[in-house]
Image (spheres, grey):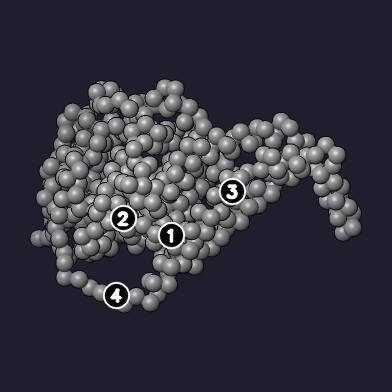
Amino acid sequence: MNALIDHWQAWLGEIQGPNGHWRLFLMVFPYFLLLEVPLNLLVLLGTLRWFARERSAVEQRTPWYPRVSCIITCYSEGRDVELTLRSLVEQTYPGMLEIIPIIDGASGNPRTTAAVRAFRASHKLPANRVIRPLAKWQRGGRVSSLNAGLAYSSGEILINVDGDTSFDNDMVGHLVRHFADPKVPAVAGSLRVRNAGQSLVARIQALEYLLSIHMSKIGLAEWNLVNNVSGAFGAFRRSFLVQIGGWDTHTAEDLDLTLRIKSYFRRYRLRIPFEPRAIGHTDAPATWRGFLQQRLRWDGDLFFVYARKHRHAFNPALVGWPNFLMLLVSGLFFQLVLPLIILGYSLVGLAVLPFTAFVFFSLLIYGLYLGMSALLYLGMLLMVSERPRQDLRLVWILPLYPLAMYALRCWSVFALLNELLRRGHEESSMAPWWVLKRANRF
């Protein structure tokens, strides 16, 4: 034991020695932690507030059951779309539910078209369920499908979903109840990874979805700071969507629409709730290559939306001071600046610090991130999770989680440079090249 203590003292002495390595470290200290720690505490406090309110709340049933239209964007899902259709048909929502699968590029996508037709022909639906397929024979992209659904649908509330996403059967009812408040133009639903057992990278994403969507959005929604209504699963008031012109061309249409909605926050005192009991299940990329390609598009889109298309959104006169500060911290700093700082910090530390010092400080930072992730994970299990046994199976991923998030931050630098230098959003698979080329350039 004494030998171990002597070893650590010698190591610390080397770090603090005459070469001033400790002072050098303070010069390049990861001060971004001073923002990350408070943000995580904000999430935990919001989650605790939500949990306390839910525990003491008395369930209130409302007789308000508006007509709901579910717009399913389909492209190359094949027979997987049947699971999406079935999970919507089996919803317990007592009101009218209009299900609209929109097949983009139907002429070149016969498997998905045939699957939708076969499902409609083989299922006898109750009186309050209707399936109205729409085949777009020429491909126009995701935004084109969403706007076609907006024009084709008749529901007071619209729910947009991906063709490879299934849902718990009480999803619609949980989402719709929020729209009884006229100040709610949109509601964010929660997503889980349904193929978590397929690979290690799928399990890492399953944990990421639990912490960054299922947990974080609960906490942020308590302060009306939801950062995004997912394009794979979100609900909107039809009249508001029509008022602002529906979805817009380009990529990252979900963040684009969320920021456009938030530009009305200050004037109309709006809010975007998050409904953790409205659960969608989606397939995440099961290979590292597919995972990195997805994040290349996502992170590049963030730069395009925040730095090019919606720079005007960083205005407290539009979004209000709380959302303005959150956009600066979580949008501009965490998404665009922090990856550059982390990569630069790592390279500087590796270049100027002795190897033992670099390892020591790396372990300290890793320990801090692991502690924050463990605290969020514990809070999720105790206060949020509706499937605690299933979520507990991911506990062994927790030590790998900070390393994976660090690698993603470094990968974000490449994505940002790809967008900055090559306008990578114009190479998106979400729409044909000719649609993106004809869109307004920002």
Viewer can see residue 235: no
- Structural crowding at the residue carrying mark 4, measured as other residues with C-alpha within 10 Å and reported as few (<14), some (14–19) or many (≥20): few
Percent x, y of residue 382: 49, 67
Q: Amino acid at mark 4?
A: Glu
Q: Amino acid at mark 2?
A: Ile
Distance between mark 1 and mark 3 Cα atoms: 19 Å
The secondary element bearing badge 4 is classed as loop
The secondary element bearing badge 1 is classed as helix
The secondary element bearing badge 2 is classed as loop
Q: Which residue is mark 1?
A: 219
Q: Which residue is mark 4?
A: 59
Q: Please tell me which residue is depicted at 22% across the width and 30% down the height of the picture.
A: 140
Tell me the number on the disc at residue 33: 3
For marks 4 and 2 on the same chain, the one whose residue lies earlier in the sequence: 4
Image quarter (top left, top right, bottom left or bottom right) of the N terminus: bottom right
Distance between mark 3 and mark 2 Cα atoms: 28 Å
Distance between mark 3 and mark 4 Cα atoms: 40 Å
Q: Amino acid at mark 3?
A: Leu
The quarter of the picture where residue 433 lies is: top left
